[in-house]
């Protein structure tokens, strides 16, 4: 067993617990095609009201971007008002679970293999150098981590700013202030399991694409942020990742998860007005959350 420096362990734990969702910034919206993601222009919005089908009070669905630079972070009065009209908060994960850090560390560890077994020798050397220069961590500390964990760490570090904000964290803080319950639409185990179903070789190639062109990664992220600030679901849903290696995994990354969430959302809304905050890439398209809620018989209209 590696004798890990406690400061490195703490840093790694914080990275994993706060940044595992950030991988969706690269994968989730980019896995949709513009055809699948098309929504009427007049309905482009991030905040949506859900009513009808016997609901006594409306609930709300908000599309987040999991990590964003502080200068670009905005939380309008309209969003805050909708949140305050709700009596429970649902995020993709139950982020106030006290065991989240420990679970993240346990689930991030590979069993019976290391990154050296996944990467080609020359690629591993490049990754080792990149990690040392950009994360300030020895590769030996990360060698047993799953590719999804490495991707999350690299995603957070590749942000084009020093200070970042998280919509999920802000909603979590708001829920605590109002003393309303925070729940998750899926478990951390399930979310890790989604990426476990993508071949290691495909994830390794994606990581090499990430570290091979920092400038391109930042440009694509900036384009995503600009679309988000415009509340342009067409652009968010239609972005296509240049790396073809994840093509074919759209169902497990988006479609299946959306379908799993809707019954949970229906039950929650029937109980009390609820506020759902999920990655914006999950909202548009015929298999998106908005379309599935409409198909289930609800009225879904744009608010902001």
Image (cartoon, helix red, strand yellow):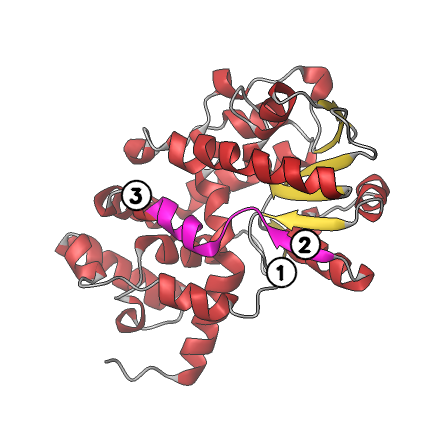
Which SS class for mark 1? loop
Q: Point out the tag, 1 or 2, that comes first from the N-terminus.
A: 2
The residue under label 2 is: 70
Q: Residue at x 18, y 62 (%)?
A: 113
Q: Is residue 12 left or right of residue 120?
A: right
Q: Nearer the viewer, residue 155 or 149?
A: 149
Q: Nearer the viewer, mark 3 or mark 1?
A: 3
Circle 1 crowding by C-alpha within 10 Å: few under 14, some 14–19, many from 20 = few
- Check disc 2 and report its element: helix, strand or loop: helix
Residue beneath label 3, please? 197
Cβ–Cβ under 8 Å for marks 1 and 2: yes
What SS does tag 3 mark? loop
**Quarter-of-image position of residue 233:** top right
In this rendered view, identify the residue nearer to me: 181 or 278.
181
Q: Position of residue 69 (x, y in %)?
A: 63, 52
Q: How far across and down, in percent of the image, does residue 123 sit?
A: 20, 53
Res. 272 image quadrant: top right
Asked if the stretch drawn in magenta spans residue 207, the answer is no
The residue at 26%/80% (across/down) is 2
Q: Is residue 194 magenta?
A: yes
53 over 196 or under it: above or below: above
For the point 73% across and 43% down, which residue is it?
271
Magenta residues span 181-195
Q: Which picture quadrant has residue 59?
A: top right
Q: Is residue 74 above or below residue 10?
A: above
Residue 127 falls left or right of residue 210 = left
| x and y, in percent, of residue 238 in the image | 51, 24
Along the viewing direction, whichever of 44 and 160 lies nearer the viewer: 44
Q: Residue at x 68, y 54 (%)?
A: 70
- The residue that disc 1 covers is 163
Counting residues from the start of the chain, the first of labels 3 and 2 encountered is: 2
What is the spatial separation of the Cα atoms under label 3 and label 1, in whole angstroms?
33 Å
């Amino acid at each position: 067993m590696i004798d890990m420096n406690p400061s490195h362990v703490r840093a790694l734990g914080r990275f994993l617990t706060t940044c595992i969702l950030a991988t969706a910034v690269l994968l989730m919206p980019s896995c949709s095609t513009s055809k699948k993601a098309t929504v009427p222009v007049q309905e482009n919005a991030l905040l949506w009201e859900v009513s009808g089908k016997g609901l006594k009070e409306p609930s709300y669905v908000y599309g987040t971007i999991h990590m964003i630079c502080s200068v670009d972070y905005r939380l309008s009065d309209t969003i805050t008002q909708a949140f305050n009209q709700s009596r429970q908060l649902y995020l993709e994960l139950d982020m106030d679970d006290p065991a989240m850090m420990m679970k993240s560390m346990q689930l991030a560890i590979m069993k019976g293999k290391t990154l050296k077994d996944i990467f080609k020798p020359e690629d591993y050397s490049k990754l080792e150098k990149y990690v040392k220069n950009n994360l300030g961590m020895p590769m030996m500390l990360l060698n047993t981590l799953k590719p999804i964990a490495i991707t999350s760490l690299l995603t957070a570090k590749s942000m084009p700013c020093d200070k970042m904000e998280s919509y999920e964290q802000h909603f979590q803080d708001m829920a605590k202030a109002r003393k309303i319950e925070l729940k998750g639409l899926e478990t951390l185990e399930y979310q890790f399991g989604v990426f476990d179903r993508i071949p290691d070789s495909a994830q390794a190639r994606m990581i090499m694409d990430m570290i091979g062109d920092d400038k391109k990664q930042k440009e694509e992220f900036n384009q995503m942020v600009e679309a988000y600030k415009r509340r342009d679901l067409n652009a968010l849903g239609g972005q296509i990742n240049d790396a073809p290696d994840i093509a074919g995994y759209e169902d497990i990354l988006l479609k299946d998860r959306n379908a799993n969430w809707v019954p949970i959302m229906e039950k929650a809304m029937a109980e009390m007005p609820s506020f759902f905050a999920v990655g914006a890439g999950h909202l548009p398209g015929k298999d998106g959350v908005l379309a599935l809620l409409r198909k289930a018989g609800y009225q879904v209209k744009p608010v902001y």
